Image (cartoon, helix red, strand yellow):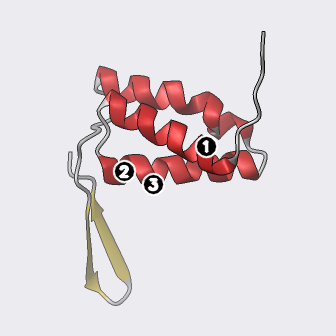
Amino acid sequence: MTTRTLTLAEIEELSFQALVGAGTREGSARSLAKAVAAAERDGIKSHGLVYVPNYCQHVQCGKVVGDAEPEVSTPSSSAVVVDAGS
């Protein structure tokens, strides 16, 4: 077995490509790919690159709506409402 060390940018791009390939819209995939790279950077392996296949499976099986368009509104100065767009 050969191992390879990836840069954080490579981890982000690999995650992004996998998520888009699974059916995640690009905006959401980019956001999650950045979070995956940050998890790797911070040593949180359970939510880093190792979990990307699970994220992809969740999109493919319908557990997560990969092409959802979330909408954020601020109905008042003390509230934020997020509609997941499912």
Q: CB under 8 Å between callouts 2 and 1?
A: no
Instruction: Looking at the image, tell me whether mark 3 or mark 1 is earlier in sequence order.
Output: 1
Tell me where residue 76 appears, x and y as whole percent: 28, 87
* Residue 65 vs residue 27, the one in the foreground: 27
The answer to which image quadrant residue 64 occupies is top left
Q: Is residue 74 left or right of residue 19?
A: left
Seen in the picture, residue 27 relative to 16 is either above or below; the reply is: below
Look at label 1 and name its amino acid: Glu
Q: Residue at x 32, y 39 (%)?
A: 24
Look at label 3 and name its amino acid: Ser
Q: Residue at x 21, y 52 (%)?
A: 85
The answer to which image quadrant residue 45 occupies is top right
User: What residue is disc 1 on?
Assistant: 10
Which element type, helix, strand or loop, lies under badge 2?
A: helix
Tell me where residue 72 appears, x and y as whole percent: 28, 69
For the residues labelled 2 and 1, the Cα–Cα distance comes to: 18 Å
As drawn, the label of residue 28 is 2
Tell me where residue 6 appears, x and y as whole percent: 71, 38
Of circles 2 and 1, the one toward us is 1
The answer to which image quadrant residue 31 occupies is bottom left
Q: CB under 8 Å between callouts 3 and 2?
A: yes
Q: Residue at x 27, y 37 (%)?
A: 65
Which element type, helix, strand or loop, lies under badge 1?
A: helix
User: What residue is disc 3 on?
Assistant: 31
For the residues labelled 3 and 2, the Cα–Cα distance comes to: 5 Å
Which quarter of the rendering shows the N terminus?
Answer: top right
